[in-house]
Image (spheres, helix red, strand yellow):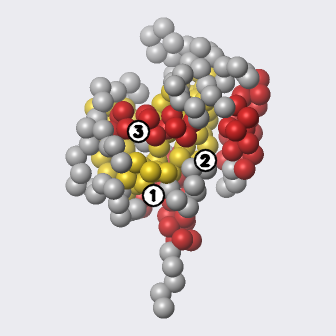
Amino acid sequence: MHKKSTISALFDYISQGELDNQYRIDTITHIQKNPASWWQRSTLDGHVTASAWILNEEKDHALFLHHAKINRWLQPGGHLDETDISPTQGAIREAREETGIAKLTLDAFHKGAIFDVDVHLIAAHKHEAAHLHYDLRYLVQSGETTGTTVTISHESLGFRWISLKEVEEQFEPSLARMAKKTLQTIKNTKKPEI
């Protein structure tokens, strides 16, 4: 896993607000404090994870999975593996494993850059103590429509394509923030009518 390029990507990440910037700084600090194990589950106080904010073909819905372990609707993603060369690759791998969608591409506008950073507490579970996830999130485009059935893994209880507007207005701040960023990105990249 490339520590230097991950820190560089976090320095390049443009924060939108105080909390967003604090998450970015906290993640950089975590990586610097744990130079050999910043992404490994064995780093008990916390580790870097990666997730994919998957849009449908029309770019008006995001894919959510009902996470079995924590009983919440979330974007696909999770822990990084030894075989992942970067968090970006880890996010795509996790998304393919959890959704069965083979054709996933990084958003052309962001060119694989970090789309969002979130730091959240994972509650203690069985033999695992409470710890932090420093989640690097990437904007991903699928060729699927909202009518597409997704093949979920054993980690999920179900899936839903949810409109970005609904996510922005009704979901927890961490997810609403990504919906808002997505809507703003789409607005900024639309070509003016002639």
Instruction: Identify whether 178 is placed above or below 121.
Output: below
From the image, tell me which residue sits under label 3: 95
Q: Residue furthest top?
A: 127
State the residue at coordinates (41%, 27%). Answer: 70
Mark 1 in CB contact with mark 3 (< 8 angstroms):
no
N-terminal of the two: label 2 or label 3?
3
On the image, the x and y values in percent for residue 80 come to 53, 27
Q: Amino acid at mark 1?
A: Glu
On the image, the x and y values in percent for residue 123 come to 51, 22
Q: Amino acid at mark 3?
A: Ala
- Does residue 158 appear in this view? no
From the image, tell me which residue sits under label 1: 169
Instruction: Identify whether 96 is placed above or below 187.
Output: above
Query: Could you classify mark 1 by the number of other residues whose Cα lies within 10 Å: few (under 14), some (14-19), or many (20 or more)?
Result: some
* Disc 1 versus disc 3: nearer the observer: 3
- Can you tell which quarter of the image residue 30 is in? top right
* Disc 1 versus disc 2: nearer the observer: 2
Secondary structure beneath dot 1 equals helix
Whole-angstrom CA distance, mark 2 to mark 3, is 16 Å
Q: Quadrant of the N terminus?
A: top right
From the image, tell me which residue sits under label 2: 114
- Does residue 64 appear in this view? yes
N-terminal of the two: label 1 or label 3?
3
Q: Nearer the viewer, residue 171 or 191?
A: 191
Tag of residue 39: none
Secondary structure beneath dot 2 equals loop
Secondary structure beneath dot 3 equals helix
